Image: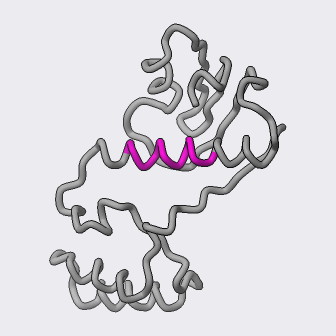
Amino acid sequence: MIDYECYKATKDTKLDTEQCTKIASRNKNLGIEDYRFLAKTMVSSGLGEETYGPKSIILGEEEHPKLVDSLSELESVFYDTLDRIFARSKISPSQVDILVCESSCYRSGATLVQDSEEENSHCCEHRSYVSSLVLWERKVHDAL
C-alpha cells in the first residue's frame, strides 16, 4: 500500500453559514418545517464553517443539473486525490502497475475505470468488481 487520502474540497467550494442559508432559501419546494430542519442541521452538524458544496449548486444551477458537471466533479476528486498521494509518498505514478481505489461517490453511469479505458484504450486492462471499488491494472502514469 502506498498511502491513503481523504479528499478535501477546494477553497472555492467552501460555504459559510450565510451561503448555506442562501442556497437553502433558493429552493421553492421546501416548506417551513424543511427550512427549520435544515437550519437545525447546519447549526448542530459540527461542520460550522467547514462545509463544502458542489460548484453547480454554489453557482445556483441546482434547478437544472448537468451530468457533465457531476462527472467533472467526480473526476476532479479522483485525480486530485491521486496527485496528492503521489506527491506526498514521493513515488512516481510510473512505478505503479496496479492501483486499487475505493470511492464512496455514487456514480450512475460508467465507472471511473471505464472512463479511463475509453480515453486510454491502447494501454489499459481493467477489472471492476463492485461499483465503488476500482481495480486499475496498467501503468498509472498513462492516465495521469
The answer to whether 67 is drawn above or below residue 119 in the figure is below
What segment carries the magenta color? 71-81
Q: Is residue 74 left or right of residue 66?
A: right
Q: Position of residue 64 (x, y in %)?
A: 18, 56
The answer to whether 12 is drawn above or below residue 139 in the figure is below
Q: Is residue 67 left or right of residue 111?
A: left
Which residue is found at the position 43% from the left and 77% from the top? Answer: 15
Instruction: Say which quarter of the image contains residue 98.
Output: top right
Quadrant of the image containing the C terminus: top right
Quadrant of the image containing the N terminus: top right
Foreground residue, 35 or 7? 7
Which residue is found at the position 58% from the left and 25% from the top? Answer: 128
The answer to whether 93 is drawn above or below residue 20 in the figure is above
Residue placed furthest toward the top: 122
Report the number of numbered marks.
Answer: 0
- Is residue 116 part of the magenta span, yes or no? no
Which residue is found at the position 42% from the left and 87% from the top? Answer: 17
Q: Position of residue 37 (x, y in %)?
A: 38, 87
- Magenta part mainly helix, strand or loop? helix
Instruction: Say which quarter of the image contains residue 108.
Output: top left
Q: Position of residue 143 (x, y in %)?
A: 56, 26
The answer to whether 51 is drawn above or below residue 71 in the figure is below
Q: Is residue 118 left or right of residue 113?
A: left
Which residue is found at the position 46% from the left and 85% from the top? Answer: 41
Foreground residue, 127 or 80? 80
Q: Colour scheme of this structure image?
A: one colour
